[in-house]
Image: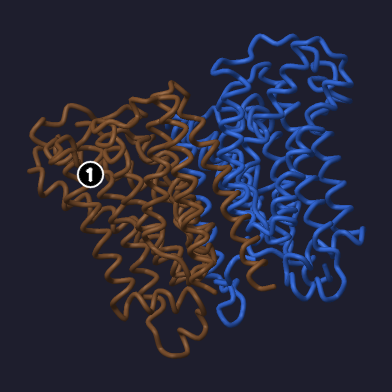
Chain colours: A brown, B blue
Amino acid sequence: MRIALKQIRFSGLLLLWLIALAIFAVWAPAFFSLANFTSILQFSTLLALVTLGQTFVILTGGGGIDLSVGGIVSLSGLFIAFLIKQGTPALAAGIAGVLFGGILGSINGLIITRLRLLPLIVTLGTYYAYNGLALALTGGAPISGLPTSFGIVGQNAVLSIPLHTLLLVLPIFLVMMFILAQTPLGRWIYAIGGNEKAARLVGLPVNTIRLGVYGLSGILAALAGLVADSWLLSARPNIGDNLELLSLTATLLGGTSIFGGSGGLAGSLIAVLFFTSLQVGLQMLNVNNIWQLGLVGLFLIGSVLLDRIIRTAGTK
Amino acid sequence: MNRKQWLLGRREVTLALACVAASVLFQFLSPYFLTGPNLITILRNSVELLLVSLGISFILATAGIDIAVGGALGICAIFVGWSVQGGWPLAAVLLIGPLIGTALGLVSAALIVWGKIPPIIATLGLFGVYRAAIFLLLGGSWISGLPDTLGPAVNTSIGGVPVVGVYVLLCYLVGWLIIRWLPLGPAILATGGNERAARLSGVPIGKTKFFVYGFTGLLVGFAAVLYVARYRNVETSTGGLVALDAIVASVLGGASVLGGKANLLGTMFGVLLVRLLQNGFVLMGAPSLWEQVITGFLLLVVLILDALAGNRRVNGSRLVTMP
């Protein structure tokens, strides 16, 4: 029964994507070109990385949610650009930036696990703190003029597939898939999300794992910041805007339960591709990007409603 | 709301002391801080937030949350702006804001009660929808240079007290009456305290939630009227950060995100402290961009202090999953 429900959900998402593609095929025939395929992947990387982290956070349950991801993307992007401007070698700056993101994420995790506070309200606080810091420290102006050599990962493509898709998104996705499906850690994540009390009683290191998923979410957000820097050769203080809403929606639309314990990464990734197709397609149709935000909001509500309806139908 | 809980209202005393301490500190750093005009500025800047926070306190008391109030305020302000532009009579202008606000609040409630969507998800989704709607309604430009239609109803004073202050106090009085004297009050607190137990004891959970979100919408609509009366323009960013500010003020005031608590006087002082700090930092020369950082850190600090003070429930149920 469970698998059947999942499939309904999964094919619903695919159907939605296909409908969007069909609409674009009619209204913007140029949508189906190799160049556009590349640009969809190019645009999807930031959201994909953040969404992979978000999915782990939500799967782990306990009201798990990370609203601060957008702020971490912006702030670590700025941090990396700042270091490079100071003359730090690109590789060192990148590593430092990713560690920095991990620290920002771990701050969420520490407050949540040590003080037993609700993730929602904690990450709402850090959402404003991180986003605000990114804006306030720069006065809203980007740090630009990064050396062109820094753009290798962000701007190049092999066989029409952007380098960062090949080097970051795919490997990370596969490793996380492997962890989730094939290792004890993956089973534990589902177990904690499914029944936290039971997980604690059988002795699973619940707090450590929870701290870990928030740290990981921070690291992935920082990688997104790194890709953005490398792509645009500048760090914008608002580059992460709305990524929390988008990643949350992608995760839920992809079939992960908001209560944790069920779902997975493949659905999240398809949802990301769906959103990005929507974004790129709307751009080609000259429709303002704010529409994407509105539509995503509707999809978020719609997907949870649908989930409810399917679930109630399933229990009857 | 028994006697013991009532005494716990000492929270507002702490907050009042914090306000005084912060004022002294800022006065030390900027001689302009404790002047009449600046204090009036702080109070004036608090008005809309006071109204929204009152509603948010009610929502938090039911263990709900509303991220979309900022967007709702923006949409209400647009309609108020249009009605002023269209030369509507004063009464109609005064009504349209609260009317639209209530309608939007009921939309949130319908999603949460009938759709059984967790409040955070429903209102986060609405937040995106409202943002897009504001952009669409405004077409990317501002409504500005509005005539002073609302002036007589808003910018006057009765016996030296600005009438806006009277409105706010009346709203809080109504809120207090509801919590303290109407059956609705215990219903709200019970819904937030333990929803299942409340449902089993016959509390009309759905109706209660419809009320709190509708009531908040009403207040948000009224706040939009006051906003338009004050600034006489509406822009795409109208209402932007009000949701967080309101949550921070309510939590500062003693509300719990887990529900079951309401301290309206605390909320009032919470709003004043938030606005006072923001004002003080700007006076000290920090760009207004820092407002967001200050509020975020304030929320975190209060949460952490609260948790360290042992204000937690047994058995780690603080970490309960969302309803």
Residue B145 locus on image (x, y percent): 66, 9
Q: Which residue is mark 1?
A: A226
Q: For the C terminus of chain B, which image quadrant? A: bottom right
Asked if residue B125 lies left or right of residue A108, the reply is right
In the rendered image, residue A179, in percent from the top left (x then y), is placed at 28, 71
Residue B304 in sight: no
Position of residue B260 relative to residue A289, above or below, is below
Q: Nearer the viewer, residue B226 or B271?
A: B226
On the picture, is B135 further left or further right than A272?
A: right
Left or right of residue B12: residue A167:
left
Residue at 44 percent of width and 72 percent of height? A114
Depth order, front residue of B272/A157: A157
Image location of residue A308, percent across then percent down: 63, 61
Q: How many residues crowd mark 1 within 10 Å: few (<14), some (14–19), many (20+)?
A: many
Secondary structure at numbered mark 1: helix
Residue at 75% of width from left, 53% of height from top? B58
Q: Nearer the viewer, residue A41 or B292?
A: A41
Q: Is residue A182 above or below residue B254?
A: below
Q: Quadrant of the N terminus of chain B?
A: bottom right
- Out of B230 and A120, give the one closest to the viewer: A120
Rendering coords of residue B32 (x, y %): 54, 27
Amino acid type of the residue tagged 1 in the rendering = Leu
Q: Residue at x 67, y 36 (%)?
A: B72
Q: Where, by quadrant of the figure, is residue B257 drawn?
A: bottom right
**Total marks placed:** 1
Q: Where is A176 relative to A11, above or below?
A: below
Rendered position, A284 above or below A265: above
The quadrant in which residue B43 appears is top right
- Please say whether residue A191 is visible from this viewpoint: yes
**Residue at the bottom extreme of this rendering:** A202
Kindly identify which chain the residue marked by label 1 belongs to.
A
